[in-house]
Amino acid sequence: MPEEILLMDNITKVYANGFVANKDVTLSVNKGEIHALCGENGAGKSTLMKVLFGSETPEEGRIVIKGEEVKINNPLEAIALGVGMVWQHFMLCPSLTIAENLILGMEPKKFGKFGPLNMAQANKVAQEACEKYGFKLDVTRKVEELAVGNKQKVEILKALIRGAEILILDEPTAVLTPQETAELFVQLRHLKELGHTIIFISHHLDEVKELCDRLTVLRLGKSVGTAIVADVTQQDISRMMVGRDVMLKIDKTKAQPTETVLKIRDLTYKDEEGRDIVKGFSASVRKGEIVGIAGVEGNGQREISEIITGLLPLNNGEITIDGQSIRGKSIRQIREMGVAHISEDRMTYGCSENLSVKDNIISDRYYKKDYKQGPLMNNKKLDSEVDELIKEFLVKCGDRNEPVRMLSGGNMQKVVVAREFSGDTRLIVANQPTRGIDVGATEFIRRKLVELRDGGAAVLLITADLNEALELSDSLVVMCGGEIVAYFEDASQVTDFILGEYMLGLKRMSDEEIGRVCYD
Amino acid sequence: MLEQIFSTLFSWATLKAALRFTTPILLASLGAIFTARAGVLNLNLEGTMLAAALGGVLGCHYGGSLWTGILAAILVGVLIAAILAWDGIYMKSNMVLAGTALNTFVSGLTIFVLFMITGEKGTSTKLTSYKMPSIDIPLIKDIPVLGEILSGHSILTYFAFICVFIAAFLLFKTAIGLRIRAVGENSDAAESVGVNVKRIKAMSLIICGFFASLGGAYLSMDYVTWFQREMTSGRGFIALAAMNLGNSHPVGTMLAAMLFGAAEAIATILQSLKIPYQLVLMIPYFVTLIGLIVYAIRREAKIKKLRMSR
């Protein structure tokens, strides 16, 4: 009979803005197993782990570790209880050595409490830990010199050296090369043999299948169930993960696409570490249609939207808008070609939270001749236009001078949308346009997108939300690992299960089928 | 004319003067290393030094000895640093505003206190101040030239150079130093392993206050033996530049401080030779700009190389 080391019982976590991230979630983990936690973006995995690590306090539910009910108020208490977290964004100091990073906060000293550092002892402790857990690292090297895979090892060691018995790894393979992933798995199996328990968060079903003993699936903040990995197929897991609950119906007629507006050919993009993020992406978007790009986040979609809108440079490949290349054009020049952009990063690229509703809306037009009176802004005209937009887009705010930070997420996004949808728009790049906002605002924004399509705009919709992808898109592209893995000419014929299998990389269409996404 | 300039400039006396001018800058810039490494922007070196300079004179006058003077200078300087720590770190004020406000405050306060005590607003000549003893170093003082340059300096000048090692030891060989470096680089990482980030930042300011107040004491207890309003005349900011140019490393900072000290010595000498010394005084700042640019270019190249190697 396996021994239960951790039980999270009926956890409910409601955020301050009313968003229910976890609803009666139950997670039971046995000692010495590798337990996968699976779920789509926003299914509540991260929240659940934050609750376990003490960074979030749940509204309801209890946590039992080794048979004892515990209250975890902060990460330090979690560490004291033997829970260790390996963050996706490393918590390391680059200019310090591996050993220094490991012993930070618990430094060995010479000659008593106030003596100097005993670096020899620190190096020895670090080296012994490396040997014990099977990590091959030179502990005197600086962290900044290490490759990502080794940095991750330091992060794991940091948790282990502080006595972690339950180790949480939040999508650890997302930043690794295939070789590094293979190495990580060897090490995790070794840790399992040493009696450690591992909670492994991943979207990659092949990894779950290869590494894990049991898995728990979350969907829309609820636990769907727990299974023994050997008993289920990847298709079974996929079916547990994806699935639509609430159907937000958007009435729309069949698209009547005409000429091509956006043309992307052989787009590739490497990040600063030299990893391939986008690998030969080609697609077309025509006037009067919504082309959806569905996929798990982090598969190159964000980069594509940022290259089209000029936030990232166009290095390899070609992008044209109405036949005109965007290469070498500034963001403003691209916008003036009729491109509107809803960024997934609302607080960075979408709006400036300390500025007023008015200032946010006029930020793309204040400089234009129509809105000027000699060298000054024509505030009368701007004010009346802003007031009209506030009305048209149903922005709930005191008045146009209220700072955007005082608005709810949905209303903030409406301010963004009011600006982006009110220009002379040829192409709309909408990246996660309704993420994290309430149902009312979601429905409003989706309807607006359809309205603009019918008015003759070309829409590229990037979304990780299956409902949105299937409801809104006329044709649908699925991305996985930086490339297109499927193309559906008619999105209404696709089911979420089929979509899920492509999104999670279980299936791939032939190049010929995918090639149909380009019309010429 | 030119010949006269050169013979005056390139004399051993110039080098000796350079070491004297280096002393207060070096002490303050060593302090600045700690705040910079902890990720704290400390614009208050100037105020700390000025307050310590007055504190030193008052300590001498009322305490009746050199040591009470030094002690008072340190106490006052650390107190000013503590005020900044409380305001900027614990009350979360903007560090630029807090530091600047405190500078202006100290500038006025020192004149006010001086006036209260002596009835004068310029200098404290009525108060008794002591001069730090000078030391002749045995053996070295007998070496021609070298002895002339290196021997016979104030005890604090020698201590300033010893402080380079003390600062390096504190920074690289103690737990507090490790924590200061970790907090400055990635405070989230430090916090995640239980390091009290606010306390470490406050401590960096206190350590900085200690070093900077020694620099202030040197001004009023060696350089001259009285307090004069605004007597720091920008040395706190020069120290900040020296720390930046020295890449917040004790040895690099020492070299940068010596560069500025030399420039000040040269400027003072040229002053007597009817060359507009403002022109000469520009040189160190120009050198700083060039130095920072070179440093930035080298850092970029290093990052690029690191990426290529992966």
Image (cartoon, helix red, strand yellow):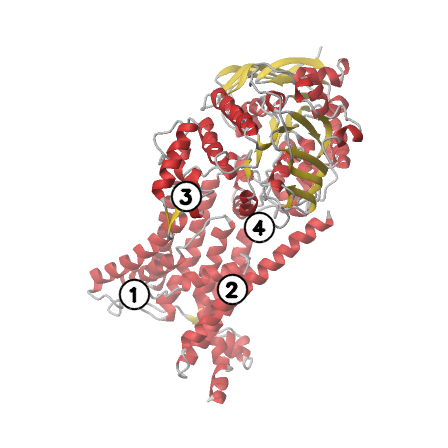
Mark 1 or mark 3, which has the lower sequence index? 3
Q: Secondary structure at mark 4?
A: helix
Left or right: A402, with A267 as reference point: left
Rendered location of residue A214, percent (x, y)? 71, 17
The secondary element bearing badge 1 is classed as loop
Real-space Cα separation, disc 4 to disc 2, in angstroms: 31 Å
**Whole-number angstrom distance, CA of label 1 to CA of label 4:** 39 Å
> Label 4 lies in what chain?
B
Q: Is residue B58 left or right of residue B26?
A: left
Q: Which residue is mark 2?
A: B289
As helix, strand or loop, the secondary structure at mark 3 comes to helix
- Mark 4, residue position: B173
Q: Nearer the viewer, mark 4 or mark 3?
A: 3
Q: On the same chain: label 2 and label 3?
A: yes
Residue mark closest to the camera, 2 vs 3: 2
Residue A406 is situated, as x and y percent measured from the top left of the image, at: 39, 31
Q: Earlier in the sequence, mark 2 or mark 3?
A: 3
The kind of residue on which mark 1 rests is: Arg
Q: Amino acid at mark 2?
A: Leu
Q: Are marks 2 and 1 on the same chain?
A: yes
Q: Nearer the viewer, residue B282 or A116?
A: B282
Q: Given the image, what chain letter belongs to the residue carrying mark 3?
A: B
Q: Which residue matches tag 1? A: B229
Query: Which residue lies under the disc numbered 3?
Result: B89
Mark toward the viewer: 2 or 1:
2
Circles 4, 2 touching at the beta carbon (< 8 Å): no
Residue A440 visible in this rendered orientation of the protein: yes
What's the CA distance linking mark 4 and mark 3?
A: 25 Å
